[in-house]
Image (tube, rainbow, N blue to C red):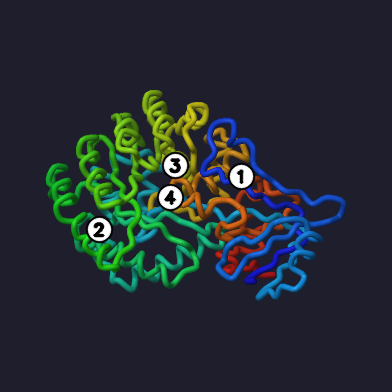
Amino acid sequence: YRLLVRHAHQVVQVVRNGEKCLKGEAMKKVAVMLAEDGVGLSLVVDKHGKLAAVGKDNVIEASFKHAAFDKVIDASGCCILPGLVDSHTHPVWAGDRVHEFAMKLAGATYLEIHAAGGGIHFTVDKTRAASDRELLESLLKRFDNMLRSGTTLVEAKSGYGLDTETELRLLKTLEAAKGRTALEISSTYCGAHAVPKGKTMEEATQNIICEQIPEIHRLMAEGVLDVENIDVFCERGVFDVESSRKILQAGKDISLRINFHGEELSNIGGAEMGAELGATAISHLECVSKKGIQAMGQSNTTAVILPTTAFILRLESPPVRDMIEGNVPVALGSDFNPNAYCFSMPMVMHMACVICHMSLPEALVASTINGAAALGRAETHGSLEVGKMADLLLVEAPSWEHLIYQFGSHDRIIKYVVKSGTVVHQRSN
């Protein structure tokens, strides 16, 4: 066996009966095992990196008394949680936008900066000018920071190329990173992140559908790329609902999951359109309507909430309580990008509780099993159940809630990060 962890005082399974996501009132009920009468809790990971057993120390010891383990961890004083899932990031780009942060503090809006050639277009210019090596090295450093913060599965977008050549470079950079990081990556093509300079929305849409997506399809068939999701920035002044629909449908036609930006700055019916197409997930949703929430609930489309964006752009919080009451599965993402520079899902969970009025259990569910659902991986990730991948955190604290409660302290209380049963980060003493 690959790993034995023993003597923990809590094991947070999140779910224990094979649930693929939690909705409504169920999001408030996290499955937790507690040590009793001085007997701690153990778990065993098999040679394939999957969870083989979870239970009381004495039961596991008796069941595996003749087993050999590559590694044994004493989890005394620790809680064990599933590895965190970051359902929305933009991690591959060059340059920074610290100067725009100052502009925002002075009162400039996101769209004002965008219209002046800043925002996404500024980063596109810097990214196109960067070498493949520069892009990969900066990406790996970002992934390492995410891993240290407890993330073991991340959604990662292209989107700072906006032309065929650069978008393919970014997707290939993500592919190269898969062999260089322990972090598991779900790659997303986001060529429709903005309308390129000098093009109309219609021209950009045509280029994406007729050139970029077919080229990605070809490289996927050749085994060069493994892209899972398609994204578009469906927003007034960027890609309207009909253009977004065409792009997303073209991605769906080559078996990409629909997972896109919608209703961030205005309500234009993107949620209803996404639900109609069978979107796996829609992100942002600060301006989603009641009809949009109803449509997402009926289609079982996951809402990926990004508290960092609302915080940094001083936007109204998404109506998360309405979504939960409307039976929409809710997940969380960091939205890591040059505009929202945050690696830490524990900080995102804390902000979700404060800004979006989520409870502690809801925030944890949104960062584990529901995050996995947003990426089509709930069968294998997002909870500590036998047969699932053994992605887990050892948190040195009286209870699991401290991971969220101790704002900005994740580097101190996360003692181990384990990916597929292998220790990939250990806190330094």
Q: Which of marks 4 and 3 precedes in the sequence? A: 3
N-term-proximal mark, 4 vs 2? 2
**Which label lies toward us, 4 or 2?**
4
Q: CA distance from mark 3 to mark 2?
A: 24 Å
Give the residue type at disc 3.
Answer: Val
Residue located 13% across and 50% down the image:
198
Distance CA(mark 4)–CA(mark 2): 23 Å
CB atoms at circles 3 and 2 under 8 Å apart?
Answer: no
Which residue occupies the extreme right position in the image?
37
Q: Nearer the viewer, mark 3 or mark 2?
A: 3
Image quadrant in which the N terminus is located = bottom right
Q: Secondary structure at mark 4?
A: loop
Q: Nearer the viewer, mark 3 or mark 4?
A: 4
Answer with left or right where residue 31 lies relative to residue 169.
Answer: right
Residue 161: give its label. Answer: 2
Disc 1 target residue: 17
Q: Secondary structure at mark 2?
A: loop
Tag shown at residue 375: 4
